[in-house]
């Protein structure tokens, strides 16, 4: 919801229960019930007085513990980046880039982090520069889930090695979880395995380098999740807005 859609008074304030209802938390009556039950916090304080007014662009509001993002003119988008697209908004070499994918958007967008050109999947875009910078900072990185098709049969001992951590040229790395989800092996099939892994950090080409290090070069790689955000059924090159719940969780993870 943009700031232009919120009817504030001359001081830039709005009644809390009205803001909650406009944000689709619940009906106005239900929002009042939530307030009276002590289920609504503003800036860390429980608010039970009906008629309390807040600044919708600044207040940190939680309903039953879940963050409600502030009203803003910014956009927060999920993109399914196609394979072969460069993770920049423009490219001097003329390669297809993110700017081409979102050329019909009116905003000046920033990408949050990046994906290798040969990697497809979930990427966040926004016109909120502070959010993009904060989310990309190593201190606030959230878990990222990837599905990788790799060469060879991945055995349990390799999964154990990855869980325990390996040493790369730029330091140690450890996966939060990894599992085999499919495999093609035997006389009539080249040895290939599909694995799903969750990793916290975002060093350059970290998933490819990690799997190559243990003897399983990546053939195809897709990022399917960032923190609470799932790629789901979003088609290659398609965009959607973050939900309020997704954005709230990301704002909390970035301590914004």
Image (spheres, rainbow, N blue to C red):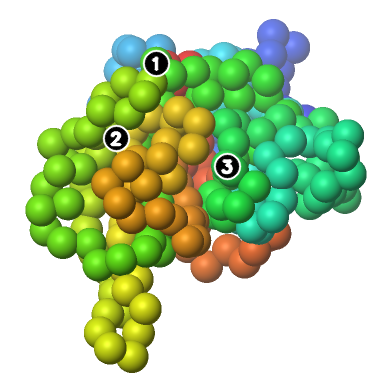
Badge 1 or badge 2: first in the primary sequence: 2
Give how far apart the Cα atoms at labels 3 and 2 are: 35 Å
Residue at screen point 44% across, 31% down: 202
> Is 228 left or right of 77, judged from the image as shown?
left
Q: Which residue is mark 1?
A: 139
Residue at screen point 78% across, 36% down: 89
Badge 3 or badge 2: first in the primary sequence: 2
How many neighbours does mark 1 have within 10 angstroms: few (below 14), some (14-19), or many (20 or more)?
Answer: few
Q: Which residue is mark 3?
A: 115
- Residue at disc 2, secondary structure: loop
- Residue at disc 3, secondary structure: loop
User: Is residue 241 among what the camera can see?
Assistant: no
How many neighbours does mark 3 have within 10 angstroms: few (below 14), some (14-19), or many (20 or more)?
Answer: many
Q: Nearer the viewer, residue 185 or 252?
A: 185
Please identify the quarter of the rendering in which residue 234 is found: bottom right
Image position of 133 with respect to 249: above or below: above
Give how far apart the Cα atoms at labels 3 and 1 are: 19 Å
Q: Nearer the viewer, mark 1 or mark 2?
A: 1
Q: Nearer the viewer, mark 3 or mark 1?
A: 3
Are discs 1 and 2 less than 8 Å apart at CB?
no
Q: Which residue is mark 2?
A: 64
- Residue at disc 1, secondary structure: helix
Residue 45: which numbered mark, if any?
none
Residue 132 point in image, percent of width and height? 61, 24
Residue 26 point in image, percent of width and height? 44, 47
User: Is residue 204 among what the camera can see?
Assistant: yes
Please identify the quarter of the rendering in which residue 65 is found: top left
Residue at screen point 87% across, 39% down: 93
Residue 34 point in image, percent of width and height? 32, 36
Image position of 122 with respect to 88: above or below: below
Residue 181 point in image, percent of width and height? 27, 68
């Amino acid at each position: 919801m943009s700031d232009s859609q919120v009817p504030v008074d001359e001081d830039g304030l709005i009644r809390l229960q009205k803001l909650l209802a406009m944000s689709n938390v619940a009906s106005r009556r239900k929002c009042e019930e939530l307030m009276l039950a002590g289920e609504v916090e503003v800036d860390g304080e429980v608010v039970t007085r009906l008629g309390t007014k807040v600044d919708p662009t600044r207040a940190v509001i939680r309903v039953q513990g879940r963050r409600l993002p502030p009203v803003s003119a910014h956009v927060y988008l999920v993109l399914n980046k196609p394979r072969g697209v460069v993770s920049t908004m423009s490219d001097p070499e003329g390669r297809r880039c993110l700017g081409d994918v979102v050329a019909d958007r009116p905003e000046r967008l920033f990408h949050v982090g990046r994906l290798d050109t040969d990697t497809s999947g979930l990427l966040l875009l926004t016109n909120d520069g502070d959010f993009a910078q904060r989310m990309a900072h190593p201190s606030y990185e959230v878990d990222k889930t990837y599905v990788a098709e790799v060469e060879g049969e991945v055995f349990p001992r390799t999964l154990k090695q990855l869980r325990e951590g390996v040493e790369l040229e730029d330091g140690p790395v450890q996966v939060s979880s990894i599992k085999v989800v499919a495999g093609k092996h035997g006389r009539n099939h080249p040895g290939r395995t599909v694995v799903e892994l969750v990793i916290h950090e975002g060093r350059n080409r970290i998933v490819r380098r990690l799997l190559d290090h243990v003897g399983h070069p990546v053939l195809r790689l897709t990022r399917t999740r960032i923190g609470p955000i799932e790629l789901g059924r979003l088609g290659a090159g398609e965009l959607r807005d973050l939900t309020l719940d997704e954005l709230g969780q990301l704002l909390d993870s970035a301590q914004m």
